[in-house]
Image: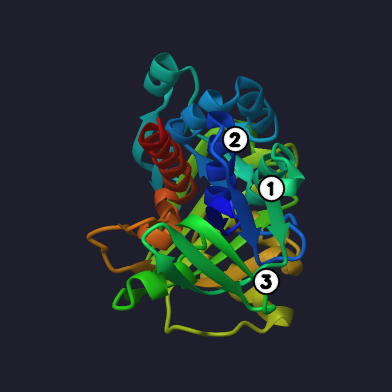
Amino acid sequence: MNNISIIGGGIGGLVTALCFKKLGIAYKLYERAETLKAVGAGTWLSPNALQVFEWINPALLREIQNLGNTFNSILVANHQLNPISNSNQDFAKKRYGYTTMAIHRGALQRILYSSLPKEDIILGKEFKQYSQNNNESYKIEFTDGSHIHTHAIIGADGIHSGIRKQLFPKSRIRYSGQSCWRGVADYEIDANLASVGFTLWGKKLQFGVSKLEQGKTYWFAVKLSKPKQKDDKTGLTVILIEMFSEFHSVVNALIENTSIHNIIRNDLSNLELLHKWHSNNTCLIGDAAHNITPDLGQGGAQAIEDAYYLSNFIMKQLA
């Protein structure tokens, strides 16, 4: 019987596994994907997340930093890139030794996965349901008909968490009224913007930008929209360029230099506040417990912080 089962191989689940590994806590991680591919676009890692990586292993932190791009400032501007607020990050560097950075989500996931023993990660296992055998054990069933027994469950399976739906059946996801496109452009942003994470605000539109690495720049575009709209991929580039035609020229340059296959669209939803994230030996982390919209730049970092505190709490209980 596994001591703890982690459901979900995203950032939160993988970091939880790394924390357990450091502390010597027995676990198995189950992920529905057959392989962990480099999917997604960019993500921000602020000092609260980077501190966790440094705690896990300073070499892990250096590897992540070497594959990403560090910010000297975080800027909010109008649609023509005129500053509204500009937060210089020297204070963070002075206090923590580093500042917020951007990295491709797929690259981060690959680093985390490669740092874990493969015998502790079981791919191709999509969660179906769990049942409690008694006060000390659970049975987890997967959609392929297999099952396992475990002492505890960590639900790291995202905003549409199957664990949460069973644990808190009255929990509710709310559509924010906004749709978001994300992309990674094959474009070298101007040198004066390379170390800036910035967001441009226009008429009911938002466009965020951050360099990821040499020749790669992450962007996201947000607008008000009805839910569940579909794009005609053949004309999407033109549509986005027209949508942001009044914005600074860097916006259209990024859109034009992004392969249509590298643009992802998602409706932005949020989870109605949960008053607790656990029941008995089942606990939610990350987006499964408290998702936030991507413009805040803290979704991944909050999941990473969850992993640190939960693993240390469990370690104290086991001591």
Foreground residue among 162 and 135: 135
Number of other residues with Cα within 10 Å of mark 3, as a class: few under 14, some 14 to 19, many 20 or more: some
Q: What is the three-letter code of the residue carrying label 2?
A: Lys
For disc 2, the marked residue is 21
Q: Using the rendered image of the protein, determine whether residue 193 is visible from the camera's viewpoint.
A: yes
Q: Nearer the viewer, residue 313 or 103?
A: 313
Q: Which residue has dot 3 on it?
A: 237
Q: Secondary structure at mark 2?
A: helix
Q: CA distance from mark 1 to mark 3?
A: 42 Å
Q: CA distance from mark 3 to mark 2?
A: 44 Å
Dot 2 crowding, Cα within 10 Å, few <14, some 14–19, many 20+? some
Q: Amino acid at mark 1?
A: Asp
How many residues crowd mark 1 within 10 Å: few (<14), some (14–19), many (20+)? some
| Above or below for 175 versus 279 | below
Q: Are marks 1 and 2 in contact (CB under 8 Å)?
A: yes
Q: Secondary structure at mark 3?
A: helix
Please provide percent x and percent y for residue 319.
Answer: 40, 30
Percent x, y of residue 215: 75, 42
Residue under label 1: 120
Relative placement, left or right, of 162 versus 21 is left
Above or below 173: residue 304:
above
Closer to the camera in the image, 5 or 139:
139
